[in-house]
Image (cartoon, rainbow, N blue to C red):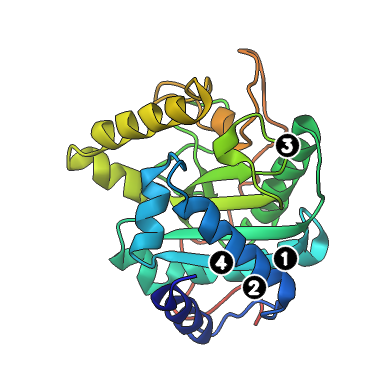
Amino acid sequence: MKQEQIAGQQEYEKSGRCRGAQTEDDFARVSREAFARFVEDAEFPCVGGKAAFNSASQIFGNYGALSSTTATAELCRDLYRFAQSGIRHESEYATFIAIFSSPLRTDEPTFERAFWRQLQQLNATDAQSFAWNPLVQSDPGDPHFSFSFAGQAFYVIGMHANSSRLARRFDWPVLVFNPHEQFERLRADGNWKRMQQTIRVRDVRLQGSINPMLSDFGEASEARQYSGRAVDADWQPPFRAVNDARAPAAAKPGKCPFGH
């Protein structure tokens, strides 16, 4: 991992009042270095992901089993810190990468169930303190759906060892949280279509086809793209957003509602 990336990660972990429970153990070190190599490989198609690493705008979190109680609590704290951090506001390509130690070598349906169970658990905790981001929809069947946490909308990418998409195939389960506002800025600047075309050309070069689940925001629900599995037209994700009417739109600045 590049020195500036390590420095950026360390600075992030020192900032804020809200800290996760994980330590920089062997799993964290090995998995983070492996993910950096994965993204920086010449054949990796997502130029947005490459831009995140080139600008040292990636933040890692390491956890135990995907969708476990402990992982959920730690991820809530870390994802909140990311949502509130300066790096999210200052970088065009800020991304939060959550790497889990298990389950390993699952098939696509099994990973998909664990993936959505994790998002459901995040949402159940989040809804006690935050309303759903008002700029996106909470119904995963809606073309304007996007996952919301800590008042921020995120496009979530799932990766695992047996993904049918080579660009999503990684040794450990991974959830990548990309702030939705970044895509909106790219669209507003007229850069999104060009980047999207570049990614698709590179994906075809890698695998021989584009991801059949890809669509533009507002055309079909982005939930269909999250886990990486090709799904049927009538597929519905196992997710129902919890919307607590008592939750404020935002918590008090600097105060973490998910513990320390």
Of mark 1 and mark 3, the one earlier in the sequence is 1
Identify whether 147 is placed above or below 12: above
Residue type at mark 4 is Phe
The residue at the point 65 percent across, 47 percent down is: 170
- Res. 176 in view: yes
The residue at the point 63 percent across, 22 percent down is: 230
Of mark 4 and mark 2, the one earlier in the sequence is 2
Residue type at mark 1 is Tyr
The residue that mark 1 highlights is 63
Q: Residues within 10 Å of mark 1 (few under 14, many from 20)?
A: many
Identify whether 16 is placed above or below 69: below
Which circle marks residue 60 in the picture?
4
Residue type at mark 2 is Arg
Residue type at mark 3 is Asn
Q: Nearer the viewer, mark 4 or mark 2?
A: 2
Q: CA distance from mark 4 to mark 2?
A: 10 Å
Compare residues 22 and 161 and report the one nearer the observer.
Answer: 161
